[in-house]
Amino acid sequence: MQTKAGEIDPVIEELVGRVREVGNHAIWSLSSCKPGFGVDQLRDNITETYWQSDGQLPHLVNIQFRRKTTIRDICIYTDYKLDESYTPSRISIRSGTNFNDLQEIEVMDLNEPSGWVVIPIKDINERPVRTFMIQIAVISNHQNGRDTHMRQIKVHSPAQDILGPPTLHLPGNFLTNEFQRYATIR
């Protein structure tokens, strides 16, 4: 689904079943935050609240999964009109098994973004990435701002895990009407 000017609305994408939000299966941490403007505000599904960093660039959002997870895209809600110099202008997405082996997989430049920014996460074969950890690094802000505001972050997995177990192919004699009668429990 798309909203104005061809933007994708990740909330609608979730509702119609194209993607699953998997951020609730992860442990979130931040490089810094002002009191009352942390992970809880970043994940509360309210676009009026936000995470505010408190320190030097880069500002980091760390998302660690307990098991290897397929990630299709990361959606970040920003509002340049409200946040101005606090709005990210360059973001780096890194992936790996832990903090020690993170590899940059995507860099995105943002020009006064207002609304959802959808960052596709792909490997070298153009498939969604399977990873234990994602790190979002704010490299720079608009107007050379020091701290950053991010209003929401969603982490999406494909609705059906395309890298999951292979499907079972039964020989032709198991697909007869006789066999199909016993395929379900009544």
Image (tube, rainbow, N blue to C red):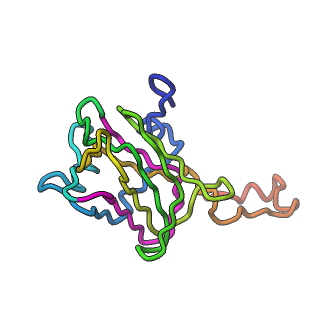
Q: Is residue 186 visible?
A: no
Q: Residue furthest bottom?
A: 100
- Left or right: where 33 falls relative to 151: left
Residue 14 point in image, percent of width and height: 45, 42
Name which residue lies at 84% across and 55% down.
176
Q: Is residue 176 above or below residue 48?
A: below
Q: Nearer the viewer, residue 42 or 86?
A: 86
Residue 177 point in image, percent of width and height: 81, 52
Any magenta on residue 20?
no
Q: Nearer the viewer, residue 179 or 30?
A: 30
Q: Residue furthest front?
A: 144
The C terminus lies in quadrant: bottom right
Name which residue lies at 48% across and 34% down.
8
Name which residue lies at 87% across and 59% down.
172
- Left or right: where 97 falls relative to 47: right
Q: Nearer the viewer, residue 160 or 29?
A: 29
The image quadrant of residue 39 is bottom left
- Left or right: where 85 falls relative to 168: left
Any magenta on residue 68?
yes
Name which residue lies at 66% across and 58% down.
124
What segment is highlighted magenta in the picture?
Answer: 56-79
